[in-house]
Amino acid sequence: MIEFTTLAAFCIAVLLLLLSPGPNMAFVMAHGVSYGLRGGAAASFGIGVADLVLTALTATGITAMVAAWPPAFDLIRYAGAVYLLWMAYKALQHPRGSVESVAAQTSLQSIFVRSMINSLLNPKALLFFMVFLPQFVDQSKGSVALQLIVLGCVLTVISTVFHTLLGTFGSSIRLFLSRHSYAARLQPYGLATVLLLLAFRLAFMRRP
């Protein structure tokens, strides 16, 4: 199995990567601000489930096969950009009201699902798992697939805790905004703006 020193190095590397600003960080923060602690947590768990799916795809070699097909990168990123644009449109469809009423209009399940799909439609996430996880695998220590699964599960736990803390921070910003009457009017536009920026980022992303 994986040695302790390798696992420790892996955990440190994951934390350093998570501390770098990225689309998941922006996504969770935006949903924490818009829908509170539970909304931020739902977005975090959606990302976590997507990480588990990507781990399984990596361990079975499916990510390598997808990455080897040249059109795959563009198909995934364009699908992701369209999905983000759709979410931005939906964010602007909520009736106006208090911050609390705006949050109540979106179910935690829908936030979870949109977060999971958004992560899975990011081609760089697929490439990341395919390139990052194998660096910490030692073929002399047993099944490569099992090691990849263990590493992916550890990454998922760290990622979920980190993003949940981000969602908590976002919910504290929401509490501040709830004290101002104009916050409910601006909230949908703030969320839509973040989603639009993420969509444009994905649409114009270049293959590594």
Image: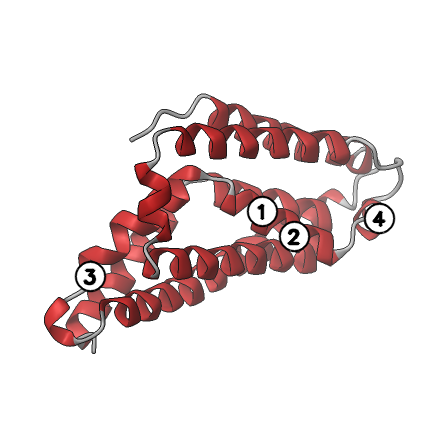
Callout 2 touching callout 1 (CB < 8 Å): yes
Judge left or right: residue 155 versus residue 108: left
Name the residue type under label 4: Gln
- Residue appearing at x 83%, y 50% in the figure: 100
Q: Please tell me in which quadrant of the rendered image residue 8 appears.
A: bottom left
Q: Position of residue 143 (x, y in %)?
A: 22, 73
- Return the residue nearer the eye: 55 or 104: 55
Q: Amino acid at mark 3?
A: Phe
Residue 116 vertical position relative to residue 8 in the rendered view, above or below: above
**Residue 158 against residue 203 in the figure, above or below:** below
Q: Position of residue 87 (x, y in %)?
A: 69, 35
Q: Residue at x 53, y 60 (%)?
A: 49
Cα gap from disc 3 to disc 4, whole angstroms: 43 Å
The first of marks 3 and 2 along the sequence is 2
- The residue that label 3 is drawn on is 136
Residue ID at (83%, 52%): 104
SS at circle 4:
loop
- Which quarter of the image is occupied by the C terminus? top left
Q: Which mark is residue 117?
A: 1
Earlier-in-chain disc, 1 versus 3: 1
Q: Residues within 10 Å of mark 4 (few under 14, many from 20)?
A: few
Q: Decide: is 183 above or below 39.
A: above
Counting other residues with Cα less than 10 Å from the Cα at mark 1, is it few (<14), some (14-19), or many (20 or more)?
A: some
Residue highlighted by disc 4: 105
Q: Earlier in the sequence, mark 3 or mark 4?
A: 4
The x and y percentages for residue 119 are: 51, 46
Q: Is residue 113 visible?
A: yes
Identified at 36% across, 49% down, the residue is 63
In-image side of 184 versus 134 (left or right): right
Disc 2 target residue: 113
